[in-house]
């Protein structure tokens, strides 16, 4: 009989997780929602914010950061799960391939870290290298790309770099994406069209002053040579070895899912209500019992002390 109760519960949980709410956005990047001129008249624009470094008049302007499966590059961004915990269901990332006018991304690779990503050769790597949660990236087929805007340099009004949004399921993460409170890094990269260039880029959060705490990480060649090893480092716009440290940035992404329910240990049958049914279950286990859900005070015995705790929580579980 009780097995039946749990089976019904499990079905309820599946139905709930199919409803994904917006849990987190790392920042916007459309700077001119009412559109541009020339060949992209009327379509929204994401214009990068240019900057110069002391002693130079050159205006740096980063249209995109490589996140290309075909060249073994990737990016990672951090997010913080609050005390209640999250059940992640979906990730939305943004990508363009210069000169492509249609959505080209056919695969998004995803991994998750519980520490800042470093690998062998990373500047400032800790003695013990962190590892991603999954030994192999999730290989995910995205929803059809949705046009979002055109990405431009700081000065251009004509270059066509249509940015598309791609959404993938995160239910392939450990435990279906259920995460306890803490700080995490989500890693992603995209597989797009092979020619005329296989490079896939993400725009940057723009303007960068709209958010703080810039710390996006890149998996790429440290020296800019495509043949060099791929290492994790903090991305720096306008970095020039020996003359400019550049400036860190943020990358746009969104997470969808649900808040985990608040723990309610006295609710033994999981119906989110502590009532006579739960007391009846506890009485079935009365006496020495290890391990035992009804042993609420953890003393290895289900007795009047546990029933008293149960009565204290009588009524609906907190949300
Ligand atoms: Ca960040
Ligand atoms: Ca999930
Ligand atoms: Ca109950
Ligand atoms: Ca007890």
Image (spheres, rainbow, N blue to C red):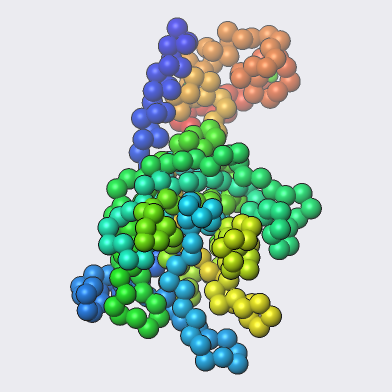
- Viewer-nearest residue: 235 or 12: 235
- In which quadrant of the rendered image does the N terminus lie? top left
Residue drawn at x 46%, y 28% as measured from the top left: 272
Q: Is residue 78 above or below residue 88?
A: below
Q: Position of residue 169 (x, y in %)?
A: 41, 41
Taking 94 as reference, is 44 left or right?
left
Residue drawn at x 32%, y 45% as measured from the top left: 143
- Viewer-nearest residue: 261 or 204: 204
Give the quadrant of residue 229. Answer: bottom right
Residue drawn at x 49%, y 40% as measured from the top left: 138
- Viewer-nearest residue: 313 or 7: 7
Taking 34 as reference, is 115 left or right?
right
Count the labels in the image: 0
Q: Position of residue 221 (x, y in %)?
A: 60, 62
Residue drawn at x 58%, y 10% as measured from the top left: 283
- Viewer-nearest residue: 159 or 319: 159
Q: Position of residue 30 (x, y in %)?
A: 35, 69
Q: Can residue 271 be seen in the rendering of this structure?
A: yes
Q: Can residue 34 be seen in the rendering of this structure?
A: no
Q: Is residue 67 above or below residue 11?
A: below
Name of the residue lying farthest toward the right: 127
Taking 152 as reference, is 318 left or right?
right
Q: Position of residue 244 (x, y in %)?
A: 63, 81
């Amino acid at each position: 009989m009780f097995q039946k109760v749990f089976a019904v519960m499990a079905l309820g949980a599946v139905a709930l997780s199919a409803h994904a709410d917006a849990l987190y956005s790392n920042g916007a990047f459309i700077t001119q929602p009412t559109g541009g001129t020339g060949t992209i008249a009327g379509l929204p624009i994401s214009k990068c914010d240019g900057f110069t470094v002391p002693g130079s008049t050159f205006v740096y302007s980063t249209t995109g950061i490589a996140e290309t499966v075909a060249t073994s590059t990737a990016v990672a961004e951090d997010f913080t799960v609050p005390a209640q915990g999250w059940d992640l269901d979906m990730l939305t990332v943004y990508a363009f391939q210069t000169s492509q006018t249609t959505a080209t991304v056919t695969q998004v690779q995803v991994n998750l870290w519980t520490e800042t990503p470093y690998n062998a050769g990373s500047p400032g790597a800790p003695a013990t290298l962190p590892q991603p949660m999954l030994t192999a990236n999730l290989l995910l087929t995205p929803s059809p790309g949705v046009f979002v805007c055109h990405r431009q340099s700081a000065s251009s009004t004509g270059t066509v770099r249509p940015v598309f949004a791609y959404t993938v399921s995160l239910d392939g993460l450990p435990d279906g994406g259920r995460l306890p409170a803490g700080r995490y890094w989500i890693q992603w990269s995209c597989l797009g069209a092979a020619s005329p260039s296989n490079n896939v880029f993400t725009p940057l959060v723009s303007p960068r002053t709209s958010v703080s705490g810039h710390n996006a990480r890149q998996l790429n060649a440290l020296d800019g040579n495509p043949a060099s090893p791929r290492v994790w480092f903090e991305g720096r716009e306008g970095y020039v070895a020996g003359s400019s440290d550049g400036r860190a940035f943020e990358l746009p992404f969104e997470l969808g899912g649900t808040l985990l329910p608040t723990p309610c240990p006295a609710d033994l049958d999981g119906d989110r209500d502590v009532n006579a049914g739960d007391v009846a279950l506890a009485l079935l286990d009365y006496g020495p019992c290890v391990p035992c859900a009804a042993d609420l005070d953890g003393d290895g015995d289900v007795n009047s002390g546990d029933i008293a705790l149960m009565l204290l929580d009588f009524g609906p579980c907190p949300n």
